[in-house]
Amino acid sequence: MKLLLASLFIGYVTAELYNATVKGTVICNKRKQSGIKLKLKEHDTFSKDDDLGSTTTDDQGNFEIFGKDEEWYGFRPYIVIYHNCRTLENGCLTRSRYEYPQSAVNGVYDMSYVALDIATAEESAKCP
């Protein structure tokens, strides 16, 4: 009986494959920013967050990142941008985090223009 219940539970709870694509243009003080590092990550509750993909903005500040992952309990992607648009100390980078909307999971999230001179709710400094 225990084996039957265990097999039913395993059959019911399975990992699902999710994907996320994010694109946009990074600006600072109304100027397009080239060479800005971005990461697409996925939040995990009990382990380290997953790295889904990364890129650097092109000469026009444009970027696009695609990532996919199998998850058991939902898919919560987010975007991290490392920049020095508003950094006060030399050599430091600001780490800005942007949530990825659930409505765009398994689709494309177009961030349009990402203005780095506007602070986000989740920012931190990364200094050498």
Image (cartoon, rainbow, N blue to C red):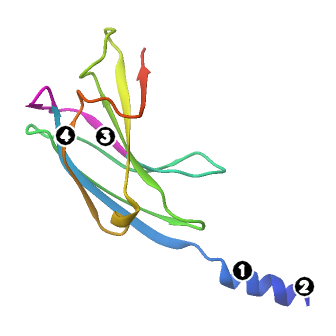
The residue carrying mark 2 is 2
- In this rendering, the answer to whether 18 lies above or below 66 is below
Relative to 81, is 11 on the left or the right? right
Going from the N terminus, do you reach mark 4 or mark 2 first? 2
Q: Residues within 10 Å of mark 1 (few under 14, many from 20)?
A: few
Rendered residue at 31%/40% (across/down): 38
Question: What amino acid is found at the position of numbered circle 4 in the picture?
Answer: Thr
Dot label at residue 57: 4
Q: Residue furthest right?
A: 1
Find numbered disc 2 in the image and state the secondary structure of the residue it sits on: helix
Q: Which quadrant of the figure contains the N terminus?
A: bottom right
Q: Which quadrant of the figure contains the C terminus?
A: top left
Front residue of 125 and 66: 125
Calculate the distance from the C-alpha at mark 2 to the C-alpha at mark 1.
Answer: 12 Å
Rendered residue at 31%/11% (across/down): 88
The magenta-colored residue range is: 28-39
Calculate the distance from the C-alpha at mark 4 to the C-alpha at mark 2.
Answer: 54 Å
Going from the N terminus, do you reach mark 2 or mark 3 first? 2
> Which x, y percent locates residue 45?
62, 51
| Residue 63 in sight in this render | no
Rendered residue at 44%/68% (across/down): 18
Question: What amino acid is found at the position of numbered circle 3 in the picture?
Answer: Leu
Front residue of 123 and 58: 123
Q: Residues within 10 Å of mark 3 (few under 14, many from 20)?
A: many
CB within 8 Å, label 4 to label 3: yes
Q: Is residue 36 magenta?
A: yes
Going from the N terminus, do you reach mark 2 or mark 1 first? 2
Q: Is residue 55 magenta?
A: no
